[in-house]
Structures are given as C-alpha cells and as structure tokens.
Image (spheres, rainbow, N blue to C red):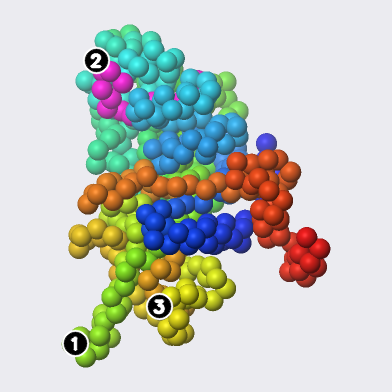
Amino acid sequence: MVLTELPSTGKFIDHLIANHIQKLDQDPHSTESDRPFFIADTGPALNLYNRWRRALPSVAPFYAVKCNPDVRFLRFLADLGLGFDCASQTEIELVLSLGVDPSRIIFAHPCKSASAIRVAAAHGITLTTFDNIDELDKMKAHAPDMQLLLRIYAQDDTAAAQLGNKFGAPLTAAEPLLRRAKELGLNVRGVSFHVGSGARNPLAFTKAIHQARHVFDLAQHHLNTKMDILDIGGGFQDTNFEEMAVPLAYALDEAFPANTDSPVRVIAEPGRYFARSLYTMACKVISRRRQLLDYTPYPSMLPDMLYLNDGVYGSFMLVLLENEVFVPDTVAVRGVLGELGDEEGQRLRATGPHQYSIWGPTCDGIDCVAPEVVMEGEVGVGDWLVFRDMGAYSVVSATRFNGFSNDYDVIYASDYMAAASGVQGPTADSSGMLWKYVEWFLPGPLRGLLKQRV
C-alpha cells in the first residue's frame, strides 16, 4: 500500500533552525549557545517508504538500527510496518521497548557473543545469521531453536563502506556449513548477503542474488534442505535507489519467481536509505583564521579557515570512514548575514563567492570537515552553517575525543506540525508561537495579509 505523501518542509526546517538560533542568542555567551543541534523531520521517510513499495513491492524492509537509533524515528518506522535489523543486545532491547513484536526483528550479525545469543533467544527473536562453523556450535549450545540464514560473501567494490572483508562465507564453504548445521539439528531457513553500505553498482546485487539461488539449489538437491527466506541486506541510497532497484527486482523475479509452489520470502536491511534525510544539522562558527596576504607565501592556495563546534570526531565521522563530502549553507537569522550587533557584526561583510576550509573543534589536524568549499558571501565568527541529510551514521559515530560532547539536542519538526494542526505539542504552547509556524505554509501575499490581522 502506498500512503499519502507529505509536502516538502525545506523552508519550514530552515525557519525552525533560525528560530532556535535566535533563542540561543538571548544568552550568547552560554555553553548552550555554542552547541550544535539537529532538526529531525520524519516526513521524507514516508515518501521514501512509498518509493520502496513502488520499486520493490515484494521485498520487506527491515530498517538497520545501527544507522540511526533515534527512538522517535524508530517508532515512526514501526508504525509504517517496517521490520528491524538489530546487530546487538542493546538494539534488540531498544526496538522491543517500542512494543515491536519479536517476529519483526532479525538479529543480523553473523559473529555474536554467547550472551547476546542467549538474550535474543530469551526475548523471542527467532531469526539470525551465521557465516562460520564456530557460530553454528554456539547456536547449538545457546539457542538451538533459532532459525538461521547463511550469510554468503558479496561485494560492491564501489560501495562507500565495504563489508565483504569481514563477513560472508565463500560459495565453496556453503555446502560444508549447511552440512554441519544439519548434523547439529539446526534449522537453516535461507541465505543472506550484504553488498556493502552505500552501494553504487547494481551488478553486485544481481550477482549475489544468483549466487544465493545456487545455495538454495545446493541445499535442496544435495542436503534435502528446503529454504524459504532470502535476505538481500542493505546498501540502498535515496540518491540512486531506482537505478539499483530496477535490475534488482528483475534479478529477483528471474531467480526467485513468486508464482511457484514454494515462494521465497524476501527481506532487506536498508539503513541510510531511510535515515539520511531525517536530520538537518546546524553548526556554529566558533573561530576563523584569515590568511594574511603579507605573511602568506602563496595566498591563492590557502583558503580562509572556519572552525565549527562539531567535526569528524563528532557527527562528521563519515569524512574519515567514507570520504563523504559535506557542503554547508549559511543561516541568515537576522535577515542580513552579519547583523550581530557587536563589533564583528558591524564590520562590513564582503559579498561574492568566498573560499574556505572547514575544521572541527578538536586539537587534531585530521579534524577537517571540508578542505575546500565556496560560500556565497563572507562567513564570520558567530555565524551558523547548515548541513543537510545528516541522519545516517552521524550521531551514532560521534565520540567524546578531546572532551567535546557527543550529546546533541534534537528538535522535532513534528512537534510544530502538531501545533499547526491544532494538536498541542510540547514546544508549541501559545497562539503567538503557533502563528510563527503556520505562516511558513502560506503564500507570501496571503501571509502578509493575515499577519496584519493577527
């Protein structure tokens, strides 16, 4: 079923950011005013869900919790009917605490601790993965009734984060692994694979699907083991989803046709596909170093440097892990960038393109968010930069290196949406505040006319 899609809330998100910054500026020298924050918007996830149902209607998505375990986001996905891919005891307990039935959870980690296996089984989790002999021995000892998926090797060499170097049994190991599982009396329900996070080559998916078909046939014809579940893992992105999904769907129809006497249930483990657009991040420029022409040998090669209140040891870890490129926008909170009311704000800002390198707050030279970006005007200390699509592998990867906090404030757009629809939200408790957010959904002339009457 395709659900009614929500309208774009881009301008609304910008308004929430500007409004929060104005609130912080009421006490500009407080610790709070120097902390980055996020705006969370679950609306895009509904549109992404509809895209998934249109392109892969026969594949049930199990959201990869490790990508972003935001509780309110998990609850939203649960309400949509998604399952959950959990890789640890903590993730399992988090999802279960939301009232999700254990049947909607897969413990998708092929190399687990004995204690985690026992906890998962005690909570009623029935499906997990394996890719080695020792894991089978552990399953027999600690959870013999759990159902298993054999994870086979798969690899997209162009993926942002490759996983084949750590997990996945080669095809030559499939028969001895299945034979050992049969000897132990374990129930192998099917096959799983993961081509890598942030996949870009659709051929990696189609190759893995046909290899999975080979394992299904091997199990049935040589070991008399009938399997009925295929887990095609993750790797999906919102930016190239249809490009990957179309050949994937064709390969599934070819290798695992639905119109047979023994249909195979197909699931997947998308993470960043759903989470990437959830967060928009606002970071403050806490310092700046301008390259002085009189003392710089090659000034054209050295852009001015901006230092933010978050960096690669915080929510920008993907710079180090995946060579992610981050390009920010500026926030014009007061109408004109730089109207700060102090000496810096009164200084005339230069206009036109400005080249900068962007750095995090730690005392480490690798803490560089972006070595070179071009902004549409001069950026100064106290300004805020906005980074969009920050929902995937951001907060979950943040550390406390150098004593900087990895605890971020998250403002939920849905609270203000509730206020606009007449539902009392936790942060919208007055008619004046309600108007601030309703007005952003109105055309300019109508907004001005109604504002005169409010």
> Circle 1 sits on which residue?
295
Q: Which of marks 1 and 2 is in front?
A: 1
Residue occupying the point 60% across, 34% down: 80
Q: Is mark 3 on a helix, strand or loop?
A: helix
Residue on which the image places disc 2 = 137
Q: Which amino acid does label 2 sit on?
A: Asp
Instruction: Write the start and end of the magenta stretch as one range.
Output: 103-116
Q: Which residue appears at 28% of the width and 41% of the height?
A: 164
Q: Which of marks 1 and 2 is nearer the N terminus?
A: 2
Q: In which quarter of the image is the C terminus?
A: bottom right
Tag 2: Cα neighbours inside 10 Å, few (<14), some, or many (≥20)? Answer: some
User: Can residue 18 be seen from the camera position used here?
Assistant: yes
Q: Indicate the position of residue 84 as horizontal and vertical percent values.
A: 47, 31
Q: Is residue 115 magenta?
A: yes
Q: Residue at x 26, y 10 (%)?
A: 141
Q: Crowding near pointer 3: few (<14 within 10 Å), some, many (20+)?
A: some
Q: Which of 408 and 101 is in front in this view?
A: 408
Q: Dot 1, how many residues are within 10 Å of its Cα: few (below 14), some (14-19), or many (20+)?
A: few
